[in-house]
Image: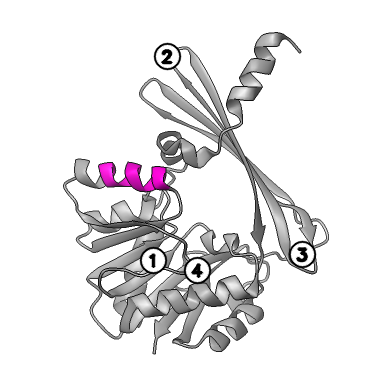
Amino acid sequence: MGRASLRLREKSRIREYSAPRFYEIAFELNRKGEVDFLVHCFKRYSRRRVRSVVDIACGTGPHLMRLADRGYAMSGLDLSPKNIEFLGQRLADNGHTGELVVGDMTNFRLARPVDAAICMQDSQGHLLTNEQLLAHLKSTARCLKRGGLYVFDRYVASSWTNPARSWSWSRRRGRLIVRASFSALNDVDPVSQVFRERMKLEAVENGTRRIYRQTHLSRMVFPQELKALVELAGGFEFVQWFFGFKPTQLLERTRHPIIMVVVLRKK
């Protein structure tokens, strides 16, 4: 390996959340169906009209921006100051305003309660213990009005025996190309249900190549376990769960679900 390659590797050891522009492009997937599903849930299951929504662990705002475009008053919470700064500029560029908070999803407050909350892309997986998940559910319940909804998605492992999965894709915007690779369910601990996720973003623009890497831990929660934790936390009633973002496909009718989407309602 040459000296130049060594220098590139040293430069590349940057968390992808420090490059929100590239992260946003890489994950600019077709979110319309997911947002359609969220709006369907708001209209069908909420006991109050949903006008205001908080996106918890919002990242660069793929769902937040689309809901804002549909007229919802949006708030966002994320642990990364760079994500919040980037998202604030995105909102302003598109003529939107909203409360954006740098904070921990296990202990947060908003300036005023909202009608609904969402937490997407398995962001709850960053909560590695029961105590953290319970604290998160209690914080979320505090920020919601009575009868409001909390909708979130979680990955489901159909098998622990050989669960590792990987994906790779690329996105182009103008002269910028972002190549992404992601692997999940590595190094699974079957007792703690914690595993390792690895991500790499390679951005090529105007002849310059930059690489961003991240490795972090995540936790799998099984469906019945999740129900028990929701009941233990208090504050919510279980409404329904689905396989993916398909309002006609209930989780228990699916043989090998990969993603469960859960709908809770504030008591």
Badge 2 is on which residue?
206
Towards the viewer: 175 or 109: 109
Q: Secondary structure at mark 1?
A: helix
Label 4 environment density (alpha carbons within 10 Å; few <14, some 14–19, many ≥20):
some
Identified by mark 2, the residue type is: Asn
Towards the viewer: 50 or 32: 50
Say whether residue 167 is magenta: no
Q: Quadrant of the N terminus?
A: top right
**How much space separates mark 3 and mark 2, taking CA atoms?**
44 Å
Label 1 environment density (alpha carbons within 10 Å; few <14, some 14–19, many ≥20):
some
Displayed quadrant of residue 13 = top right
Q: Tags 3 and 1 in contact by the CB under 8 Å rule? A: no
Name the residue located 50 percent from the left edge and 68 percent from the top edge.
Answer: 106
**How much space separates mark 1 and mark 2, taking CA atoms?**
38 Å
Badge 1 is on which residue?
37
Q: Position of residue 235 (x, y in %)?
A: 44, 87
Reading the chain from its start, which is encountered first: label 1 or label 2? 1
User: Does 2 sit above or below residue 202?
Assistant: above
Reading the chain from its start, which is encountered first: label 2 or label 4? 4
Point out which mark residue 22 bears: none
Is residue 249 at least partly visible in the picture?
no
**How much space separates mark 2 and mark 4, taking CA atoms?**
41 Å
* 77 relative to 71 in the view: left or right: right
Badge 3 is on which residue?
159
Q: Main secondary structure of the magenta part?
A: helix
Q: Secondary structure at mark 3?
A: loop
Reading the chain from its start, which is encountered first: label 1 or label 4? 1
Identified by mark 4, the residue type is: Thr
Q: How many marks?
A: 4
Q: Quadrant of the C terminus?
A: bottom left
Residue closest to the far left: 95
Reading the chain from its start, which is encountered first: label 3 or label 2? 3
